[in-house]
Image: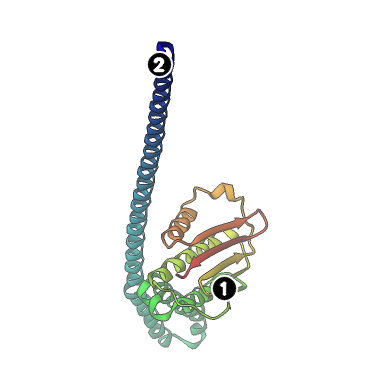
Amino acid sequence: MQSSVSTASERYLLVYMIMVLIIITSLVIVFFVVFQKRKNKLLQDKIKQQQAFEAEIIQAQTEAQEQTLKNIGWELHDNVGQLLSFASMQLSILKMQVADDVKDKFKDTTEALSNGLKEVRALSKTLNNDVILNIGFEKSITNELDRMKKMKFTSAELKIIGDKVPFLDRKHEIIVFRILQEFLSNSVKYSGAKNIGITLNYKPERIIITATDDGKGFDIKDIEQGSGLINMKSRAALIHADFELNSQPNSGVQLVLNYPLN
């Protein structure tokens, strides 16, 4: 009888120990899961805070750059433009006072001054975001491409596909335009291209913007840390646009910007 009671007690004790072990194990697992979730949340919060901080820095830099460009645009239009206008006027007065056989020698200088004045005025407009917003996104691109043709390119054309879909945030128009302006500037300085083109492919929820040149191209790895590429990438990230730059030596350059409209 005593042996039977002892066996039952041992059995109950064993069951009790097993239950305690299960409970402890369960608590450890629950604690571990909660700890991991909390750890992951803290990491995610930290990443979000870092991303928000970086976005604020980029936003501040972009606004400062825009203000600087606007100031330069004003200086070009008001000061440099006035000086060129004055020089052109003085040259015209001087031309009237010289002999006829000398007047022809003024022709090239007069044309150079006139073209320089037009270029300064056109450039001043592309640097002022208020002007860009006023004349519109597509017209601003067309004006910039027209400047490119006057400078060095055989052709510089804008192609539009689909029905135009307006930007919900018009500030993003400026940012996209600045990215394209950076691309065009690099093409002028480095590409040796003869032809350049920009395509705006409007879709219901996004715009796919493609810019290409037929220049000498480059190895993409060689310019990964270049300031121009960093500026373009930073601006694209600021408006949540997918940015892709493709190039190979002797194969030109292609920029693809996928901008979400919603």
The vertical placement of 28 against 115, above or below, is above
Going by the image, does 104 lie left or right of 15?
right
Residue 221's spot in the image, x, y percent?
A: 58, 47
Residue at the farthest front position: 1
User: Residue, x 61% and y 74% (percent of image)?
Assistant: 155
User: Image quarter for residue 118?
Assistant: bottom left
Q: Nearer the viewer, residue 121 or 206?
A: 206
* Residue in view at x 57 percent, y 57 percent: 245
Give the color scheme: rainbow, by chain, secondary structure or one colour: rainbow
Q: Which residue is mark 2?
A: 5
Kind of residue at disc 1: Asn
Image quadrant holding the C terminus, namely: bottom left
Q: In the image, what residue occupies the spot 56% across and 63% down?
A: 256
Q: Earlier in the sequence, mark 1 or mark 2?
A: 2
| Residue 201: assigned label | 1
Q: SS for tag 2?
A: helix
Q: Please name the residue shown 37% across and 72% down the image.
A: 129
Residue 2 in view: yes
Q: CA distance from mark 1 to mark 2?
A: 86 Å
> Foreground: 224 or 33?
33
Q: Is residue 253 above or below residue 78?
A: above
Is 111 left, or right, of 129 in this rendering? Answer: right
* Amino acid type assigned to the residue bearing label 2 in the image: Val
